[in-house]
Image (cartoon, rainbow, N blue to C red):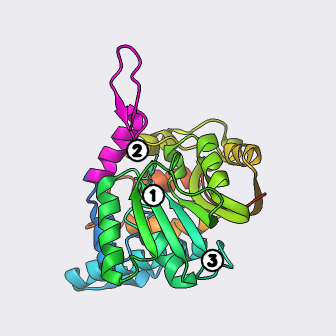
Amino acid sequence: MTIAPEAGTAEVSLPTQSTYQTRVADYWNAEENPVNLELGKLDDLYHHHYGIGAADRSVLDEPDAELRRERITTELHRLEHAQAEFLAERLGPLSPADRVFDAGCGRGGGSVVANLRYGCHADGVTISEKQAEFANAQARKRGIDDRVRYHHRNMLDTGLESGAYAASWNNESTMYVELDLLFAEHARLLRRGGRYVTITGCYNDTYGQASREVSLINAHYICDIHPRSEYFRAMARNRLVPVHVEDLTEATIPYWELRREADHLVTGIEDTFLNAYRNGSFQYLLIAADRV
Ligand SMILES: C[S@@+](CC[C@H](N)C(=O)[O-])C[C@H]1O[C@@H](n2cnc3c(N)ncnc32)[C@H](O)[C@@H]1O
């Protein structure tokens, strides 16, 4: 399917609906960061989000260089996995008959976590064809491909069945889209009483506008971090009523402090995140909402 071109502009195919979305898809199709792949290889749970909780910094004292790298990798993965479990816990209660929707699913770890926890069916959607293929191969390898499926689609326009989902989420993927369009799609997919959860970085309205650090993060990931206030406004406009809000900023700092010392995994954005959290311009937030 194609969208009719305006005079003088290029034709755009779905699932990307704009040049911007094509650039985001290009980024994730090409992405091979060790911090994503090396951690995932440990147990075939591929998370492309940050971690939470106290870090075991004794891994930095390991004298053997190779073992030190391995122990740091394992510890960062443990913290990222703890974040995924924290989100999954707030989707429930769910039964194996339920369906869940993972918006902006990356290489698929979040849907596997939900399936392992609840036995539920999951549909993950990513704008990256390569990620969808990778995640489906992982589901086949685990023997859960009859229940966990990944689609190369746009999360703003998924084509999935209306009202069929008991829960849905965005784990660090809301900053790539307009929130009104995103929440309208979640509201369409969720059944009445269904649960929506997001964990996201947002800029702090009390700081003022986006800080230098927030702008650097936007440039690094080609994204557009929203202010905290915009989440609540857009949810209210789209039949999503917040039931739980948790500021995870303090909880994510140990992850970043450890990651900045992981020479084999750093991407160069670590200090920017730490500065943004510490100067109060940026927050790591969980919002759970009910679809009414
Ligand atoms: C930081 S990653 C998070 C991945 C995953 N949620 C996780 O926690 O591991 C952001 C994801 O958002 C996806 N994404 C960005 N814009 C999208 C869109 N319009 N439709 C579907 N996926 C999108 C990217 O392809 C990527 O998989």
51 lies above or below 17: below
Where is the C terminus found, in terms of image quarters? Answer: bottom right
Q: Position of residue 127 (x, y in %)?
A: 39, 50
The residue at which mark 3 appears reads as 89
User: For numbered disc 2, what is the local secondary structure?
Assistant: loop
Q: Position of residue 57 (x, y in %)?
A: 43, 80
Q: Is residue 212 visible?
A: yes
In this rendering, the label closer to the viewer, 3 or 1: 1
* Crowd rating for badge 3 (residues with CA inside 10 Å; few <14, some 14–19, many 20+): some
Tell me the kind of residue under disc 3: Glu
* Crowd rating for badge 2 (residues with CA inside 10 Å; few <14, some 14–19, many 20+): many
Q: Tell which of 246 and 277 is nearer to you.
A: 246
| Alpha carbons under labels 3 and 1: distance apart | 20 Å
Tell me the number on the disc at residue 125.
Answer: 1
Circle 3/circle 2 CB separation < 8 Å? no
- Residue range in magenta is 1-29
Q: Earlier in the sequence, mark 3 or mark 2?
A: 2
Q: Is mark 2 within 8 Å of ligand 1?
A: yes
* Residue 9 shown in magenta: yes
The residue at which mark 2 appears reads as 15
